Amino acid sequence: MHAGRIGVGESRTVERTSTIRAAQRPGLTTGRLTVVVIIAAALLLTLALPLREFLNQRSMIAELETTTAAQRERVEALQAEADKWADDAYVVGQARERFHLQYPGETGYVVTDPPQTDPQAQPLATDIEDDSAWYERALRTVQRSQQQPDESVVVVRPDAPR
């Protein structure tokens, strides 16, 4: 045969070898695809836990920042209240208002509302706010405790000890 020419038998051999080589070419075969899927799943599982922890920590940080902001507001409000109480004029005003204290020579007045005549408009005894001075309320409580029991009290159980 000639050096530059390919014969009929040789052309068949060339076609077969090219077909075999095409089948043997590296590509994604079933085995290789399985290995790639397993590696991808392993990477996904490896990254899932740290990602979840990261997200949990971010939400925790956001909660703590909210709590810290609320506590800062509370501290500021308490600081403002403490600044008020540091002022002597405020303390005197509160003592006069809350304890009905007066300077010597002053006359104290307590203004009360007129009595209500409508029975539905009158609040229950537990709803009445007593605006009298604290020492008057304490004295009335002691006096009530020393009084004899009222006979108008209804006994629920007649056999109950008195």
Image (spheres, rainbow, N blue to C red):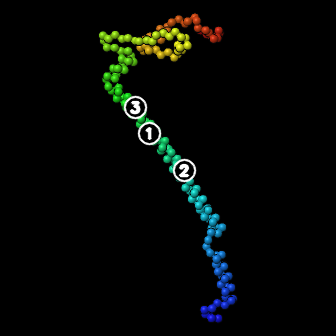
Say which mark, if any, is on residue 60.
Answer: none
Mark 3, residue position: 77
Going by the numbered disc 3, the residue's amino acid type is Ala
- Measured along the vertical axis of the image, is residue 117 above or below residue 65? above
Label 1, label 2: how many angstroms apart (C-alpha)? 24 Å
Label 2, label 3: how many angstroms apart (C-alpha)? 38 Å
Q: Residue at x 62, y 9 (%)?
A: 155
Q: Residue at x 55, y 52 (%)?
A: 49
Single out the residue that lies furthest toward the bottom: 1
Residue 138 in sight: no
Q: Earlier in the sequence, mark 2 or mark 3?
A: 2
Q: Residue at x 64, y 80 (%)?
A: 18
Residue 48, image x and y in percent? 56, 53
Judged by depth in the image, the label closer to the viewer, 3 or 1, is 3
Pointer 3 local density, CA inside 10 Å: few below 14, some 14–19, many at least 20: few
Q: Are marks 3 and 1 in contact (CB under 8 Å)?
A: no
Going by the numbered disc 2, the residue's amino acid type is Arg
Q: Secondary structure at mark 2?
A: helix
Q: Earlier in the sequence, mark 3 or mark 1?
A: 1
Say which mark, if any, is on residue 52.
Answer: 2
Q: Residue at x 38, y 28 (%)?
A: 81
Q: Secondary structure at mark 1?
A: helix
Mark 1, residue position: 68
Residue 41, image x and y in percent? 60, 59
Q: Is residue 114 left or right of residue 149?
A: left
Residue 9, image x and y in percent? 69, 88
